[in-house]
Image (cartoon, grey):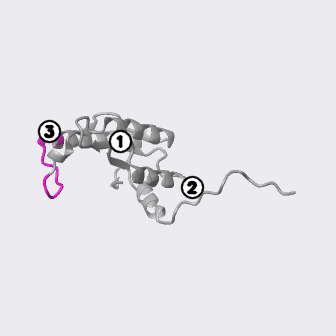
Amino acid sequence: MRSRSTTPTIRPPLVSRPACRRIRKADGLIVVSPEYNYGLPGGLKNAIDWLSRLENQPFKDKPIAIQSATGGPLGGSRVQYQWRQVFVFLDAHVMTRPEVFAGLAQNKFDDKLELMDQPTIDFVKMQLAAFEKYMREKLACSFTAVVQL
């Protein structure tokens, strides 16, 4: 009698491969996420899960910055902590500060969805400058690109 494995073979969809190549090529990753019902958005979480199933998953040792926006006043603090847990499990290097939380986001963007709120713009600029320094320290190399997923 032959034994059957109880672990199914997981084959990520082919559409995940180009994203995986882009992330591997990038020096860092900026995750900009909404917060839905105090948690991770399902579509983005599924994309990260599929990419993490590929051979030599692309998040290992990758510097990552996280930004969030919500319609509520807290700006996505809960979702940022959840993303940190996900990326720590994937052996990524998550930059913890400075943080970007865009609370009441519906009031901070214009009709073309461009960020118009100067304090939030200043926080984003501060985080991007810190992220460049963080990547240089983590990677000790020159940069090719930062990919937004």
User: How far is mark 1 from mark 3, CA to CA?
Assistant: 25 Å
Residue placed most toward the observer, 69 or 125:
69
Q: Circle 1 sits on which residue?
A: 37
Residue 66 locus on image (x, y percent) = 33, 42
Residue 119 locus on image (x, y percent) = 14, 38
Mark 3 or 2: in front is 3
Q: Residue at x 41, y 50 (%)?
A: 42
Q: Which residue is drawn at 43% across and 60% down?
A: 19
Please indicate whether residue 51 sits to the left or right of residue 113 in the image: right
Sequence-earlier tag: 1 or 2: 1
Badge 3 amino acid: Pro
Please indicate whether residue 73 sits to the left or right of residue 16 in the image: left
Q: Circle 2 sits on which residue?
A: 55
Badge 2 amino acid: Glu
For label 3, the SS is helix
Mark 1 or 2: in front is 1
Quadrant of image for the N terminus? bottom right
The magenta segment is 110-120
Residue placed most toward the observer, 93 or 140:
93
Residue 131 locus on image (x, y percent) = 30, 41
Q: Circle 3 sits on which residue?
A: 119
Mark 1 or 3: in front is 1
User: How far is mark 3 from mark 2, CA to CA?
Assistant: 41 Å
Give the prevailing secondary structure in the magenta stretch: loop
Badge 1 amino acid: Asn
Q: Counting other residues with Cα less than 10 Å from the Cα at mark 1, is it few (<14), some (14-19), or many (20 or more)?
A: few
Please indicate whether residue 63 sits to the left or right of residue 60 in the image: left
